[in-house]
Image (cartoon, rainbow, N blue to C red):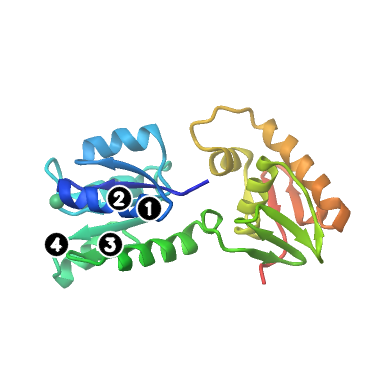
Amino acid sequence: MPATILIIEDEPAILELLSVNLRHAGYAIRTAQDTRQAQDQIRDVLPDLILLDWMLPDQPGIRLAKQLRTATRTREIPLIMLTARGAEQDKVDGLEAGADDYLTKPFSVRELLARIKSLLRRRAPQLTPDPIQAGGLILDPEARRVSCAGQDLPMGPSEFRLLHFLITHPQRVYSRSQLLDQVWGDHVFLEERTVDVHIRRLRKALTPAGQENRIETVRGAGYRFSGAPS
Ligand code: CA
């Protein structure tokens, strides 16, 4: 699943340049030209990362950044601010408003792509193609393969995505509803017990390698992957 990036930028030439290049880099792109359109887009699909211009026609991007950081649904979205301003104070304001990173125009597309990649790696590693190793398990997103000591562990696409999320967020407990949001998408209406079904299938897929106990049930809370990535 490619990461979805929402670009919020009112200058058509820059919006076009960013859309073309990011799409070419393999991302799914959504666009907005002011903060109202951006809110509509976010209501529709929660993006995996946001590029936010500082100067927008309806209200400053920085105000939207603050709004996104106070709402539960959008609090965690990785956010890069784009701006023509280079003043130190603006940079500080941007970061204080909740931006994870900050780029001053004009910037090179290569630098932007590198920043996006590094931010996703830091904040949403399950969306990057990097292979992950945890304990004896190796998960390779590009090959869509899980193995342990050379042994293939076949599993369905939902189990794969579930394992990919859990393995990139080890030692943390996720509730069923958090897992639904993260693995199935926040606009998919499924019952929470769907998660239990897929956890059961995932454990079964890991059983031939004796790795099923890595997926722990935390009573009254949810599930946790044990074993630090190496
Ligand atoms: Ca602008």
Q: Look at label 2 and name its amino acid.
A: Val
> On residue 84, which mark appears?
4
**Residue 226, percent across and down?**
72, 60
Image mark count = 4
Question: Which of the two discs, 4 and 1, labels the residue nearer the N terminus?
Answer: 1
Residue 96 marker: 3
Residue labelled 4 has its Cβ within 8 Å of some atom of ligand 1: yes
Task: Tell me if 218 is positioned left or right of 75 in this view.
Answer: right
Q: Mark 2 points at which residue?
A: 20
Quarter of the rendering occupied by the C terminus:
bottom right
Q: Is residue 213 left or right of residue 92?
A: right
> Looking at the rendered structure, which numbered label has been put on residue 153?
none
Which is more toward the observer, 137 or 145?
A: 145
Q: Which circle, 4 or 3, is nearer the viewer?
A: 4
Q: How far apart are marks 2 and 1 (CA)?
A: 6 Å
Three-letter amino acid code at the position of disc 3: Glu
Q: Quadrant of residue 131?
A: bottom right
> Which residue is pictured at 31% across the width and 63% down the height?
112
Left or right? Give the position of 74 relative to 154.
left
